[in-house]
Image: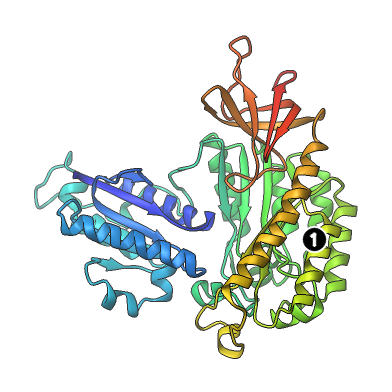
Amino acid sequence: MHKGEIDIITLGCSKNLVDAERVMRRLQTAGFTCVHDAPAPKGEIAIINTCGFIGDAKEESIRMILEMVERKKKRQLRQLYVMGCLSQRYSRELPEEIPEVDGWYGKFDYDALIERLAVSHWPLASAEHSSSANSQQPTANSRNCATYERTITTPKHYTYVKISEGCNRFCSYCAIPLITGRHTSRPMEEILDEVRWLVKQGVKEFNIIAQDLSSYGLDLYKQHRLAELIDRMAQIEGVRWIRLHYAYPTDFPYDILPVMAKHENICKYLDIALQHCTDHMLSLMRRHITAAEQDELLDRIRHEVPDITLRTTLLVGHPGETEEDFIALKQWVIRQRFDRMGAFAYSDEEGTYANLHYKDDIPQQIKDRRVAEIMAIQEQIAAEKNEEKVGKTLTTIIDRLEGDYYIGRTQADSPEVDQEVLIKADCQQQILIGEIYPVKITQVEGFDLYGEVKGER
């Protein structure tokens, strides 16, 4: 057990990661040593940042909490705190079910957790300071960093920037609005200040995230402001790549498309969850869009931003999905040929519209079969698209050296979720981590591209 050391464990999405990074910086300012996602946690304090989106994510969070409870019972851990989506959603039930946890904090009240640790663990946090009664104790209010400053846990050349929280869409299957509340945009100037600060920390690639990018600005400015935000961000010196995640198809801000087409440092990449393709299912899912409108949106995006990479997510096994709906979905995937696609099976989440109004009547084995079938189709499409890249030179950022290969990503590849480019390490050519190079693709193996650097960065 390392005294004064806090293990911070982040589960779930990149939005949770941003929250964890802010907590880490605040605690470090208060004098603690923080370790993020250690393979073998050894700190005397642990903070678990949980996910509560779907069943599998909730189970993973509970398993991690119980694992830390066991460490505490063995006196390998002194205190355990839980924050994030799961504790936000089940703030009443969890303290009764797992009393060994010393404190439960939601997604938006981690200030209280920081205050508690900074004050109650003063001797641990700042042993180098005087321990006299007159010493000024560190609190969250004594920090000397802006609210957006954080400890970067990703490779230093890329990060995530969260521009809003919450969602007003209330799709039938989704618990996010129940956890995060209504959509709330961050002020534009604050976001731009954060990007400028991150550039000074060495960040080159900015992955812009939100539950709903499409609604950015509607609450604060009474109009869509995503295009203006991204346009101004692209003009900040040092911003090499910008990538957009989690747009919503309904009421899509079309003015973002000419901005994407105009700036070379905005990746021609859009992550837009579409979920399904038939009017029947889009209506049951409460997506507020028709199949024809959705197809028109995709056509316009591809027309206005040529060669764009589209990533989407599909949901199968939702109550009411017939075999005919699923066949139509497969045919649609074949026709649309998405560059990147994920699929997941419906999970009946308490409190959602589907949970309250529909019967979860599709057996799990059918749900799993549909996921496997749709992903098999997409895997073939992805393989064909990869073959088309052989012989082309693609702009590639280098993430790391792993064994005999440098590992990189093209503008069409987001960290963690998309494919990578492998470049044979060659002592005759210096390749720097975090730099961007032209890479000629020489072959494809599975979902990986192999290439060689052509020219200077």
Q: Report x, y in % for residue 217.
A: 67, 66
Q: Report x, y in % for residue 356.
A: 56, 89
Which of these two is toward me, 364 or 213? 364
Relative height, residue 118 to residue 264 (above, below): below
Tell whether 378 sits left or right of 68.
right
Q: Report x, y in % for residue 71.
A: 22, 55
Circle 1 packing at 10 Å, graded few (<14), some (14-19), many (20+), is: many
Q: Amino acid at mark 1?
A: Val
Placement of the C terminus among the 4 image quadrants: top right
Relative height, residue 444 to residue 58 (above, below): above
Residue at point 84% right, 61% down? Answer: 298
Relative height, residue 40 to residue 22 (above, below): above
User: What is the secondary structure assignment of the residue under circle 1?
Assistant: helix
Residue at point 60% right, 61% down? Answer: 210
Viewer can see residue 212: no
Tell whether 104 sits left or right of 247.
left
Residue 373 sits in quarter? bottom right
Which residue is the extreme one toward the left?
A: 132
Q: How many marks?
A: 1
Which of these two is toward me, 144 or 446? 446
Which of these two is toward me, 356 or 155? 356
Residue at point 88% right, 72% down? Answer: 292
Viewer can see residue 131: yes
Which residue is the extreme one toward the top?
A: 428
Which residue is the extreme one toward the bottom?
A: 357
Q: Report x, y in % for residue 97.
A: 28, 76
* Label 1 sits on residue: 333
Which of these two is toward me, 141 or 25? 25
Residue at point 71% right, 66% down? Answer: 248
Tell whether 202 sits left or right of 112.
right
Placement of the N terminus among the 4 image quadrants: top left
